[in-house]
Amino acid sequence: MANSSQNYTCFEITLEGGVAHLQLSRPEARNSMILEFWSELPAAVNELSDSGEARALVISSTGRHFTAGMDLSVFTQPDSLFTSSSGNEQAEFGRVRAEVRSAALALQESLSCLESARMPVLAAVQGGCVGGGVDMVSAADMRYCTADAFFCIQEINIGLTADLGTLQRLPRIIPDGLARELAYTGRRLTADEAKSAGLVNQVYPDHDAMVEGVLGIAQEIAQRSPLAIWGSKEMLNYTRDHSVADGLTYIATWQAGMFHPDDMAEVFAARAEERDPVFQNLLPVRRAL
């Protein structure tokens, strides 16, 4: 299995057969989301998406818990997004608060990269998925968990309103009333409840079985046309946020530009020849000239 050449503080990344596997790698700290997390995650996901080599991305974790959520150091470190102006006594109050807003938007974008990635993102959760962890997995395409997993909107338990995506995405995944109960009480949602409510697709008996199973699903996705998969993700996300009529118009426009018969012809040829189809990767994205 090929390893990423990039060294990350919070992650280990491998890529094999079109399936990228990003693992949270700070189990001794319950994989809390330190300051580096918020720059490394979008950097890693965007690199995988832009390269065109990754056709599916699995996010899993190590140790007892998936993640304990936001690390308090994000708020207290001297170079934190939230403390950069705290030592400037000359800064006008409105400008300081505007900077805090910008910091929150930057953190939101660090997780929204999972939605904007050209490949599906599959989250595999063991143990606790707390606070920012719920923000993160809510932005994934699909979620899976172990029998001992639980999900907690921890922010309300420490006097905060969740602000990085949970309250915007979770009610579109699970029933609104349940999302509100979790947001207002901060109670733990168990694995069985998560499965019943539709938050997770499947519950596995243990971590090893889950990672093996989810990587297997990702491998199935990677065998399909990456252009058709990207189009499917684009349409599902767009239609979630728009009317059916808007979604139908968008898919018609997308197909007019993106659909060509080569991938379909390859599918039928592979069936006739009793082999697996072979598709070209997506072209690399050039973010700057």
Image: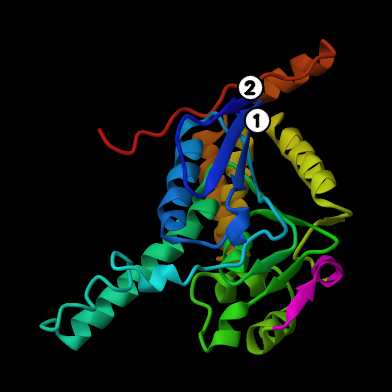
How far apart are the alpha carbons under marks 2 and 1?
Answer: 6 Å
Name the image quarter holding the N terminus: top right
Q: Is residue 72 magenta?
A: no
Camera-nearest residue between 141 and 25: 25
Q: Which residue is mark 2?
A: 279
The quarter holding residue 129 reads: bottom right
Residue 12 locus on image (x, y percent): 57, 41
Residue visible at 59% across and 51% down?
A: 235
Q: Which residues are magenta?
A: 187-196
Name the image quarter holding the C terminus: top left
**Cβ atoms under marks 2 and 1 closer than 8 Å:** yes
The quarter holding residue 80 reads: bottom left
In the image: residue 191, left or right of residue 232: right
Decide: few, some or many residues near mark 2? Use Cα within 10 Å; few <14, some 14-19, many ≥20.
Answer: some
Residue visible at 46% across and 61% down?
A: 34
Marker disc for residue 225: 1
Residue visible at 61% across and 56% down?
A: 28
Name the kind of residue labelled 2 in the image: Phe
Residue 202 locus on image (x, y percent): 84, 56
SS under mark 1: loop
